[in-house]
Image (tube, rainbow, N blue to C red):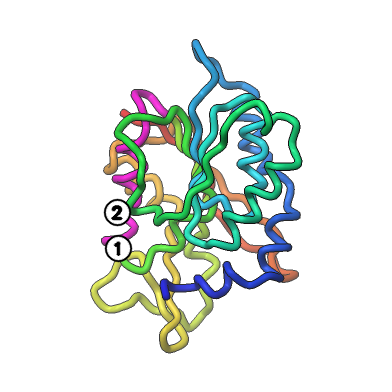
Amino acid sequence: MPKDLAFWEDPAQVERFAGLEPDELLLELVTGYRGARPPMALDLGCAGGRNTEALVRAGCRTWALDLSVAMTRATRDRLARLDAFRSQSVPVVQGRFHRLPFADACFDLVVAIGIYVQADSDAELLAGLAETRRVLGPNGLVLVSMWSTQTLPPDAERVAGQRFVYGSKPGETRCRLSRDELIDLMTQAGMPPDRPVFERRPIRDGKPHVANVGVFAKR
């Protein structure tokens, strides 16, 4: 079983994620989108469908992907309650972020909120970034939210042979990036920042966490 999959299949977690509101920056992004046609959008790591719903409501032609069977089911259930859903087909598929089952250059927008942190290794992270760029069309945008290295516990150390994967407890790993590392990796992957990358400090488990958030563009 891939890392943390049991967490995402847990009914309590499914219910929690299914009840979340859409990401505010995503709402701003799709509201301000300018193009000749409604954007083709992918919610990468859709969880309970909060951002998939926002994309559909904004008129995007939408796809959603998640590894968890329970989360994809919750996303379909959430969409089924929308009047907007009845007017378009919204494929919700099971898959991995570093092996996307989509054609080259087929999306105008990819939503990658909290997904790259699921990488088990540097190689998987880099493969995920390459896959995101592959499925983006010319000048396509990707919205990224990535937990910062500032969220690591004090005893966390880099896993041997890895730059971006850390461990503290045996068998427990976390992929984390500093703001500069996120900018550098996205730029090296051919998706430099489209606007300034900033820190967001959401409350999680009663404590403030730090996420690096930015919109990047395929070049």
Image quarter of the C terminus:
top left
Kindly report the secondary structure that dominates the magenta region of the rendered protein. Answer: helix
Q: Which range is magenta?
A: 122-140
Q: Are marks 1 and 2 in contact (CB under 8 Å)?
A: yes
Q: Say which element carries label 1.
A: helix
Q: Is residue 214 above or below residue 5?
A: above
| Outermost residue, bottom side | 170
Residue at horizontal 40%, vertical 50%? 182
Q: Say which element carries label 2.
A: helix
Q: Where residue 126 sits: x, y (%)?
A: 29, 54
Amino acid at dot 2: Leu
Numbered circle sitting on residue 122:
1
Q: Where residue 68 sits: x, y (%)?
A: 52, 62
Q: Nearer the viewer, residue 178 or 36?
A: 36
Q: Nearer the viewer, residue 149 or 42?
A: 42
Q: Where residue 193 sits: x, y (%)?
A: 42, 35
